[in-house]
Image (spheres, rainbow, N blue to C red):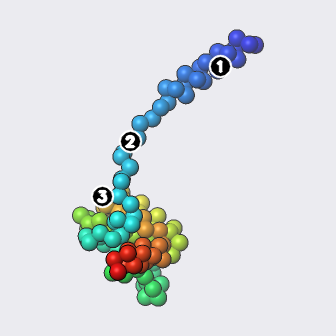
Amino acid sequence: MKIQFSGLLLALAFMLSSCKTSPATAIPTTSIKEVVNSSDVTLVDVRIPEQYAAGTAKNAINIPLAEIQNNIETLKGKKVVVFCNKGIQADQAMEVLKKNGVEAYDGTTWKNVKAIQDETNKKAN
């Protein structure tokens, strides 16, 4: 029994050490704060128009999640930050955009993006 257990431990140790993975893609070094505040960013609020009209981040455009697929061509070649109320729709929009080759970043919520903008404006003044 001891020999089988030792063999199992040895095999397990070998398997674990051979499973070292290297990162498939480099982790972007750009923070969401840098992206939100860059001059060439397109801020996209993916909520419905009524929610967008009630309040959003500065300079954001409204493309509801249901229409994001139809707007891929207009967003290609741009740096896009998507956001919504709680981040769920933004996650879904991110998936669609990335699958279609759009450089997209997750701003999570409109309040988060607005807070980043407000923080930057305070530092500038």
Q: CA distance from mark 3 to mark 1?
A: 45 Å
Number of residue marks: 3
Residue furthest toward the top? 3
**What secondary structure is found at the residue carrying circle 2?**
loop
The residue indicated by pointer 1 is: 8
For the residue carrying disc 2, how many other residues have a C-alpha within 10 Å: few (<14), some (14-19), or many (20+)? few
Residue sitting at 58 percent across and 23 percent down?
13
Residue bearing the label numbered 2: 24
SS of the residue under disc 1: helix
Q: Which secondary structure, mark 3?
A: loop
Under mark 3, the amino acid is: Gly
Residue 119, image x, y percentages: 42, 75
Q: Residues within 10 Å of mark 1 (few under 14, many from 20)?
A: few
* Disc 2 residue type (three-letter): Ala
> Nearer the N terminus, badge 3 or badge 1?
1
Residue at point 69%, 14% (across, down): 4
Q: Which one is earlier in the sequence, the residue at label 2 or at label 1?
A: 1
Marks 2 and 1, Cα distance to the nearest angstrom? 30 Å
State which quarter of the image contains the C terminus: bottom left
On screen, residue 41 above or below 57: above
Verify CB contact (< 8 Å) between mark 3 and mark 1. Answer: no
